[in-house]
Amino acid sequence: MPPTPSPARPPSARTPFGHALAGLLDVLLPADCAGCGAERTQLCPACRHALTATRPGPTLLPWAHAAAPYADPVRQLLLAHKERGALRLAGPLGEALGRAVRSALGARAGAAPLLLVPMPSARAAVRARGHDPTLRLAGAAARSLRRAGLDARAAPLLRHARPVADQAGLNAAERRRNLHGALTVLPRARRGLAGRQPVLVDDLVTTGASLAEAARALADAGLPARAAATVAATAVHPPGRYG
Ligand SMILES: [Zn+2]
């Protein structure tokens, strides 16, 4: 009896080595713009403009500010960074995230050192992608805030405490119930962070239910988040503000 062939790896799954190779090619080869496909540039001026042209503002969750609406080409840039390992986009995306952090905090941005806390990725997703895109964006945002003269660092404090059901098809109240208690703060990760203002960061906010659960977890651990910031939002408040 012939040996059973091992199941084919899905095309989206990359080994860490495959990811490292892709990262190397990402640096060596001129690629097309991840936002619109324009040739011989990873981020064309028009797509860079889309990331920087809108003023960050509040989302459906008023204490969470986003840098841009979740629409192409920003959507394509986020997907290329997250799913296709376009790591050089972390810089410009992190810069946009840093602007959203400053918008969310307003005058409080310079009041105390900042602690950017990325929303945690599921371990299986990190393995499949070969990197943790949200952690990378948080680090890039902290660097851009430091360039602007603010004391900022990123720290992955949050972990999943239990698996959650697929959020698709659930309304806002059902999402909150599904997520309650889903996140926890790693006790050892908190050392040396006293006196910093925590700000939750993510690539995208939709209903805000995940950010609300993360804020609950931080508050329970004695680290109340002052604000949240994302690169993009599916809906903004008041409606049409970014239009
Ligand atoms: Zn472009």
Image (cartoon, rainbow, N blue to C red):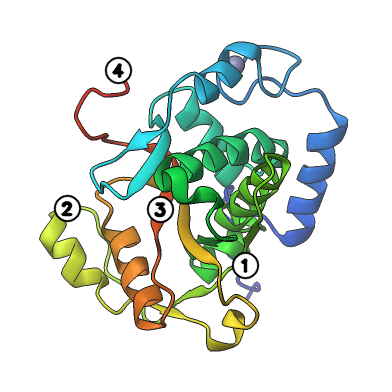
- Residue at image point 36% right, 81% down: 162
Q: Measuring 47% from the left and 58% from the top, which residue is drawn there?
A: 199
Mark identifier at residue 163: none
- Reading the image, the residue beneath label 1 is 6
Split into 4 quadrants, where in the image is the N terminus? bottom right
Q: Are marks 1 and 4 in contact (CB under 8 Å)?
A: no
Q: In this view, does 15 lie to the left or right of 109?
A: right
Identify residue type, mark 4.
Gly
- Per the image, the residue denoted by label 3 is 228
**Could you tell whether 59 is left or right of 193 in the image?**
left
Residue 243 numbered tag: 4
Assess disc 4: are there few (<14), some (14-19) or many (≥20) residues with their C-alpha within 10 Å of its C-alpha. few
Q: Please, what secondary structure does the residue beneath circle 3 have?
A: strand
Pair 3/1: label in front? 3
Marks 3 and 1, how far apart at CA: 43 Å
Q: Which amino acid does label 3 sit on?
A: Ala
Asked whether disc 3 touches disc 4, contact meaning CB atoms under 8 Å apart, the reply is: no
* Residues at marks 4 and 2, CA–CA distance in whole angstroms: 27 Å
Q: 111 or 209, which lies in front?
A: 111
